[in-house]
Image (cartoon, grey):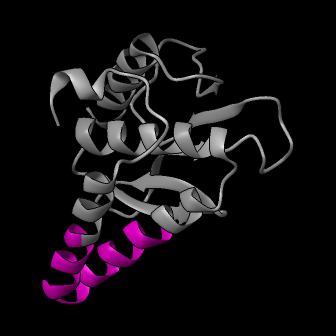
């Protein structure tokens, strides 16, 4: 994905991105049991994103692309019905909660205790997310990279 594409506001995955994700899921399944589990997790996340309202879906798709690019070592999976990304131990590091899940006025990007975001005695672990922009993307990349460091 070019730098220009990754920093522009999008209405969701384009057909090429969808096809690439389906191909990757097939590759993972072909790798065997461990790969099949990753492929199933990826498919579950993509299916959950597809079920979201259009505004939430667009945000979730951008979060998915950004998290998987910034931290390819994290594995997509659903967690309490939300798209989430787990470390090698299977522990959730970051998750996305769409606004429709609990009828909130904003979606949430959240981090679990496995995220390395500690900053003294008090630090944020969830962020309200209403619109995607280059500034939002930059902040999400920074947070995700710090979380897996």
Q: Quadrant of the C terminus?
A: top left
- x, y percent for residue 17: 28, 52
Decide whether residue 36 is among the magenta residues.
yes
Q: Which residues are magenta?
A: 23-44
Q: Nearer the viewer, residue 94 or 7?
A: 7
Q: Quadrant of residue 7?
A: top left
Residue at image coords 21%, 21%: 4
Q: Nearer the viewer, residue 149 or 61?
A: 61
Compared across the picture, whether 2 is left or right of 147 comes to left
- x, y percent for residue 49: 55, 56
Residue 108, above or below 17: above
Q: Nearer the viewer, residue 116 or 40?
A: 40
Residue 13, above or below 8: below
Residue at image coords 54%, 40%: 58
Q: Quadrant of the N terminus?
A: top left
Residue 32 shows in this picture:
yes
Residue 73, above or below 121: below
Residue at image coords 33%, 25%: 141
Residue 97 shows in this picture:
no
Name the residue at the right extreme.
103
Compared across the picture, whether 4 is left or right of 15 comes to left
Residue at image coords 31%, 72%: 38
Q: Nearer the viewer, residue 40 or 60?
A: 60
Secondary structure, magenta segment, majority class: helix
Residue 113, above or below 142: below
- x, y percent for residue 51: 64, 62
Decide whether residue 134 is among the magenta residues.
no
């Amino acid at each position: 994905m070019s730098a220009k594409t990754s920093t522009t506001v999008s209405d969701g995955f384009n057909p090429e991105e969808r096809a690439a994700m389906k191909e990757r899921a097939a590759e993972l399944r072909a790798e065997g049991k461990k790969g099949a589990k990753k492929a199933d997790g990826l498919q579950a996340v993509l299916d959950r994103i597809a079920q979201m309202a259009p505004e939430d879906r667009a945000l979730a798709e951008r979060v998915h692309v950004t998290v998987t690019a910034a931290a390819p070592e994290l594995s997509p999976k659903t967690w309490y019905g939300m798209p989430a990304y787990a470390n090698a131990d299977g522990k959730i590091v970051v998750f996305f909660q769409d606004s429709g899940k609990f009828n909130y006025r904003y979606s949430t990007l959240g981090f679990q205790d496995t995220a390395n975001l500690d900053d003294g005695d008090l630090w944020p672990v969830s962020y309200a997310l209403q619109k995607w922009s280059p500034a939002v993307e930059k902040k999400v990349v920074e947070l995700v990279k710090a979380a897996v460091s």
